Image (cartoon, rainbow, N blue to C red):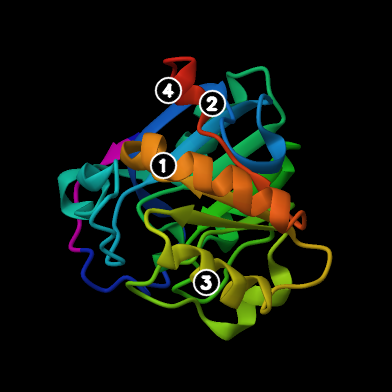
Amino acid sequence: MVLKKQHKKNYQSENQLILPVMEQFYSLQGEGSHTGKAAYFIRLAGCDVGCFWCDVKESWNAEDHPDMDVEDIVQLATESKTEMVVVSGGEPLIYNLNYLTEVLHKNEFKTHIETSGAYPLSGKWDWICLSPKKFKKPVEEIYPEADELKIIIYNKSDFKFAEEYAAKVSSDCHLFLQVEWSKSDEMLPLIVEYVKENPKWRISLQTHKFLDID
């Protein structure tokens, strides 16, 4: 059931029963450690991180998107044939996600989140992809929890940025460098050479864009 829009300036609201949803869809995970796997995506609306190269800026204003009951969000996910649900945004952790992950787990889903880490961690997650941004730093508590670190490479200075955050996560965290799509021709050859010189890193490609799928 889609609910009437509510004022969402208080991102730290304790209301866990409804969430603003930009879109939900069933597709393939295109990035990182789980590339190629079938996944159900829940893209929450609302973000104040403000990446200028963001390709889903329409997700930033939560007021532009409907609130949905968490039970209904999960019910839609159960109509897919996958056990993996990826929650992204926007920045999903501006909301309390405890109840969302509780209901997802009750329905036997594996819960994945993609976050900048700019807000405190809520929810119980089977996989956490941390993708920190220069515009709003992660909270310290998320570093040891990250299963995967994904750094977007837009220019050469981002390699130094990547190393700064690689030093903060746990030793078993998977490390990925991912080119910003519009800079692929310029930066991808540099990423290839960087990974060859620093093999602790791996390349993450946005394979869904190569495949022309959502």
> Which residue is tagged 2?
207
Q: Residue at x 43, y 45 (%)?
A: 187
Q: CA distance from mark 1 to mark 3?
A: 30 Å
Q: Quadrant of residue 121?
A: bottom right
Q: CA distance from mark 3 to mark 4?
A: 31 Å
- Badge 3 element: helix
Q: Residues within 10 Å of mark 4 (few under 14, many from 20)?
A: few
Count of labels in the image: 4
Q: Residue at x 49, y 15 (%)?
A: 211
- Badge 4 element: loop
Mark 3 or mark 4: whose residue is earlier in sequence: 3
Mark 1 in CB contact with mark 4 (< 8 angstroms):
no
> Which residue is tagged 3?
160
Mark 1 vs mark 4, foreground winner is: 4
80 over 104 or under it: above or below: above
Q: Residues within 10 Å of mark 1 (few under 14, many from 20)?
A: many
Which sits in the foreground, 24 or 105? 24
> Which residue is tagged 1?
43
Mark 1 vs mark 3, foreground winner is: 3
- Residue 57 is situated, as x and y percent measured from the top left of the image, at 23, 47
Of the 4 image quadrants, the one containing the N terminus is top left
Mark 1 or mark 4: whose residue is earlier in sequence: 1
- Which range is magenta? 2-7
Mark 3 or mark 2: whose residue is earlier in sequence: 3
The amino acid marked with disc number 2 is Thr
> Which residue is tagged 4?
214
The amino acid marked with disc number 1 is Arg
- Badge 1 element: strand
